[in-house]
Image (tube, rainbow, N blue to C red):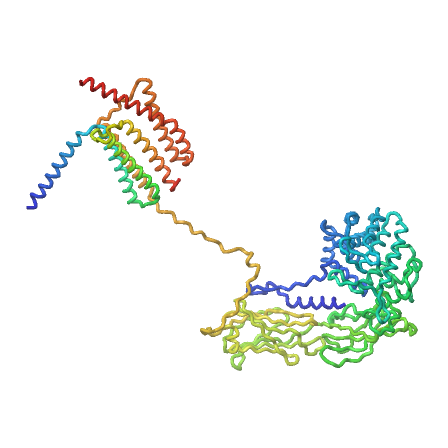
Amino acid sequence: MSSTRFLTTIGKFVHFQGYEDDEIRFNCPTVTINIIHLLRLLEEAYEALRTFEVLGIEKKPEDATCKSVVDTLSSASSNSKDLYHALRVNGLLKCKTSTAALEGIASRLKDGLKHATLLLDYYHSVGGLLLIKDQSPEVDVLLGNADGIVHSIKALSQSDGRWRYSSNNPDSSTYAAGIAFETISGVVSLAASAIDENLIGTLKKDIVKLFDSIEKYDDGAYYFDDKHIDASGHQGPLSATSAVVRGLSAFAATSGNDGAYYFDDKHIDASGHQGPLSATSAVVRGQKPLLEIPEDKILGLARLFLGIGIPGNSKDLASVPLILSVPATVLSLTSKDKLKVRVSTVLGSSAPPLSVKLMQIFSSGSKDASVLKQELHFDPKEAIYTMEALPEGVDIGDYVFAFEIVLSDLELKSKYATGGRTKVPVFVTGVVKVDNAKVTLLEGDSVESEKKLDLPGKNDVALSANHLQKLHLSFLLTTPLGKPFKPHQVFLKLRHETCVEHIFVVENTGKQFKIALDFLGLVEKFFYLSGQYDIELTVGDAVMENSFLQPLGSIELDLPKAPEKATQPPPQAVSPYLRFGPKAEINHIFRVPEKRPPQEVSYAFLGLVLVPLLTFLVGLLRLGANFKNFPTSAVPATFAILFHGGIAAVLLLYVLFWLKLDLFTTLKTLGLLGIFFVPEFIFWSERERTLSHLASTAAKLKSA
Amino acid sequence: MVKPTAATTKDDAQALFKSLRSAYSATPTNLKIIDLYVAFAVFTAVIQVGYLAIVGSFPFNSFLSGVLSCVGTAVLAVCLRIQVNKENKEFKDLPPERAFADFVLCNLVLHLIMTSLPAGWPR
């Protein structure tokens, strides 16, 4: 109930804070508000949906929740716990899941059971299989090795009736015992073949032993508690007791006896759901022949559950409380919503014939309340009580409605507790009319220009002012019933082109809202920034259906220059996503290539360099250098050829080096050539020496 | 008094030049060849320096390579001349062929280095 109101309020809040992109003039970074997805976690989603179901509140299936369910069910990495919770939510929301998917999950859960070692693994897997059986009867969920599984679960039990969570951890708790009973009964119901009777017998003994550890409050309520405080495992007496009772009821149901044994009254409906309160009814349906538990203990447990948070005194605990709920606590005057009230028992079943009266309406502003005694009309088809029209004078705002239930049949007064007056907070919303909106520019006391505004429609005024002038804005706000209305938010915002913002609250007297901006006094506040300012008006409230945030236009402000010591405007927030945008382009500065001479000059000098070579050759000829001493006979000729050839080869290698090769290959080749030609050198030089010596001696002989 | 001095200077220069020429023609042919070679090498180097003066020193490595190869080969040729010259008493026992072979080898090494120089030091 309260969550619905919370969601609606959030919705309205987000609505009048939203921006429309095409109306933002300057590209200023803004922060957006997202509606929080409250129902992400499947376990909490299940609890919320079940609460709605019990209280009779219609809830459309949330696409996000269904998507989360389908994702979890189809994901290969979900463990048995995730699958269990997803299946529970699926059972309530009835999301579209294929039989094939459920079959896959069933086989995964069965595999999980084979390898399970922890108690919670057994619990989630068996629970998941039971849910699949409910949702899709054609899927095969029967367990082959039921006896073995029951044995493994039983192996975790202790002698005092408690259960351990795993074989490694010696900590035991009553909550775990409840879980174990529920799991074992689940296994029994899913067993392909009948379970060994002795096993069931030992389990019964365990249950009786557990009841020896039951404790008692002063008012007669019995409960189970866990002895030691373990941060993760300690569940508190309520959860521990409810787990045990749930387990017992599941166990009792599997035995096949369907005892029509109601606790005192036929109106209590045993639907077998898993909430703590409904568990009581299941216990009450319990079998005397199966479990030998003393009756006073059962009654004590019932007292525990029924005594929680129900209005009335302890005497009423013997009777069934009636709950009055208002499914829709936000009524709109524009759509002429009718007030609807639902009365049911705590367990969600229908109430006996009664009448509901609206006794008082408290409005949030005033202390006094209007006293009515208006009876609501009962609609049997939908089983709700409605009021055709809201009482006179109910304007938009925040009210508390006080209801009273009167039973038609006075004999039932001992059976049912009506709980006196139930106070329900109700919001009445409507459209607020904006009249006479105008913006005025004043010079001294005389009006310079006046422009009418159309609110809450679009406006675009263009004003210009200097620091000696004043800006006035005024408008009237009236409720649907014509009364003055003061919304929560009435703001005027001026935003400079550099995204510096200034917000002013618009004051009111009665219906009239007025603000006067004296620029002379605001010069310092505006940080002496002249230029174009965007004007925006925000009017909003939770009960206002047409809350708006409208840009009104712009004003060109001419402020004096800032003095030396003026404060600088605060630095504006840079959108954090900017750093993922493109960075500044890097311009590389390359080394400016050196100035080269024109090619003709280079070629000319090339020719010029070759001139000395020619001169040398010419000079050689002139000097009469003889080339005659080249030996012609075979052996010396070979050496001579090789010698000169070797030098030529090396020079050729140098030419290749210049043109193409690198130093290493050149050196390698040079080395090879050198190895070959060094002996050549030596031989040649010796040969030449000998020859010249011979020639000289021959000459000497001749001369002599 | 100026005129006769100038004339005397000029005459002296001419006489000096003439005597140098006649003395030079007495040197053996092979030494003359070597001298010519040295002149060729130096002349080439001078042209390269002139080119540098005109167009600037880029790329400097090329200039170094060219000039140093010219100068180096000139130096080696001078060494050869010293070793080959019969009037030089120190190198009497060194056969001229051997000196020539040394000259060739050293030139080869020099030109190897100078060929790789323009591509950057050391390459």
In this view, A647 is above or below A423: above
x and y percent of residue A280 in the render?
Answer: 86, 63
Is residue A220 rendered to the left or right of residue B11? right
x and y percent of residue A339 in the render?
Answer: 79, 71
Q: Nearer the viewer, residue A192 or A386?
A: A192
Quadrant position of residue A648: top left
x and y percent of residue A552 in the render?
Answer: 59, 70
Is residue A3 rendered to the left or right of residue A409? left
Quadrant position of residue A406: bottom right
* Quadrant occupied by the C terminus of chain B: top left
Q: Is residue A242 visible?
A: yes
Q: Is residue A357 visible?
A: no
Q: Residue at x 88, y 51 (%)?
A: A199
Q: Nearer the viewer, residue A385 or A412?
A: A412
In this view, A673 is above or below A49: above
Q: Residue at x 13, y 34 (%)?
A: B19
In this view, A404 is above or below B62: below
x and y percent of residue A410 in the render?
Answer: 91, 74
Tag count: 0
